[in-house]
Image: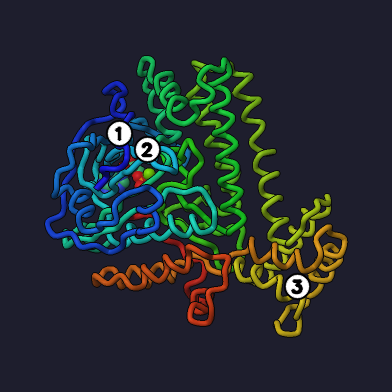
Amino acid sequence: MFENIKFENPFSTLPSSFYTKQNWSSFDQPFLLHFNHDLAKSLGIKDDPQELMQIFNGSKSFTKASPLAMAYAGHQFGNWVSQLGDGRGILFGQIDSSEGLIDLHIKGAGKTPYSRFGDGRAVIRSSVREHLCGEAMFGLGIPSSRSLMLFGSNEPVMREVTERGAMIVRTAKTHIRFGHFEYFHHNKITNGVKTLLDHVIDCYYPDTKQDSDKYLLFFDATVKKTAHMVSAWQSVGFNHGVMNTDNMSILGETFDYGPYAFMENYDPNYICNHTDSQGRYSFSNQPNIAEWNCYALASALIDIYNETELRDTLNNFNGYFYDSLIEKYRKKLGLKSALDSDYDLLLELFKVMETDNLDYTNTFRDLSKIISLPDNYELSEKLTLWLTSFKDRLIKDENTIEESVLMMDDNNPKYILRNYLAQSAIEDAELGKSKKIDELVKVLRDPYIDQGKSMEHFCKPAPEEQQNQKLSCSS
Ligand code: AMP
Ligand code: MG
């Protein structure tokens, strides 16, 4: 199964305060809902979904694994929680693949010592959502965890209503979160932060191992990756929904999908998480929160770093974020050269999109066609006016119009994972059917390429009453 790949779990060699070694609780009769053949191939994992499901369900033993539940903590909605940890997940192991070191983590695997009041399970609904979003992000080129496989069960799981249990096998470069460092620092576990830092550098930044600045390089890299990740979210209209520090990967991969949403009509104040009454994790607040989370991480590193160094590094966040953001938006507008006025041009477009209730994704996607054939589109007065300035700007650019058009199409996705699409795949999956998951995965893997008439329905905005809805946090 994994014979040809190196399989290990270096995390399991760390001191026992870092985790609890344990097995997981299998389902009686799991049924496969989706197997990610592409991902299996890129990881060098044998393409045998049924046998893999038996292994990941725990119904067939696999002696090379050293499964464990990780201990961590975190700030949830700004409040400190000293003990979280994998309450329903098992780190199965780490494979040394052509993609580098990749964690395999089973989510929905039953109770662990960190389950607190939870049942250790995940439901089909949330597992389908996580499985789909990993592929959507992958297609968009945004760093993210992915899911190798998804299987359901008949095990009843109580949420707002009774649902059924499912598991996904999540892959990510790491499952180490900001909250891991916070756990060791705030709980005053001797040598915890330093041991974890050394582990992270060994595994993920081995080239800096001999460097006297290695710790600082790690923190700066984390700040930068986090800023870049969030700039990518903003550029595609993605609202994560639960940016707690325990959901922030130290390697800047989008992680722990809950009530996320890709925005439909442009609304900077959109809050996808139903329980987020204050809008802490609203779309436009994501960059601030990402920075806040970096501060929380810095606070956990204070015993090892010099405070001024930490502050100076934190001050880099804004530069990393805005440089990356404007670069992404220039590409979305088809611009090769950079003018100071580009930022204002963009803000004007956002204003038009907001007042005219325009679909974020489709507005950007259509720009390349609108500039050539405006008569084919029903354009508002405000958008027509904005297009005049946009055309003036395009003329001044180093790109020819043809080059700009290509650049726009390469950087504005035609297909995104709209929640109503995910919902219809969920409803099917709950009946044991997976055709809609297959279709969505296929279309979302290549979101920048027009996939023809038969796929056209995937670009339709949600019906008005389903636009930018709030989603339940329960999963
Ligand atoms: P999340 O909101 O999914 O990021 O989870 C926050 C914390 O609650 C993590 O420590 C999870 O492992 C834990 N948790 C979430 N759902 C459950 C559940 N059903 N059973 C046990 N622990 C859970
Ligand atoms: Mg989480």
Q: State the quadrant of the C terminus.
A: bottom left
Q: Residue furthest front?
A: 4
Q: Position of residue 278 (x, y in %)?
A: 51, 50
Is 235 in front, or is 148?
A: 148
Q: Residue furthest bottom?
A: 376
Identify the residue shown where x is 59% and y is 68%.
265
Mark positioned earlier in the residue sequence (1 or 3): 1
Asked whether the viewer can see residue 97, the reply is yes
User: According to the image, label 1 marks what residue?
Assistant: 8
Identify the residue shown where x is 55% and y is 40%.
226
In whole angstroms, how far apart are the C-alphas of marks 3 and 2? 50 Å
User: According to the image, label 3 marks what residue?
Assistant: 383
- Say what amino acid the circle numbered 1 marks: Glu
Q: Nearer the viewer, mark 1 or mark 3?
A: 1
Mark positioned earlier in the residue sequence (3 or 2): 2
Q: Residues within 10 Å of mark 3 (few under 14, many from 20)?
A: some
Where residue 96 is drawn, which disc sits there? 2
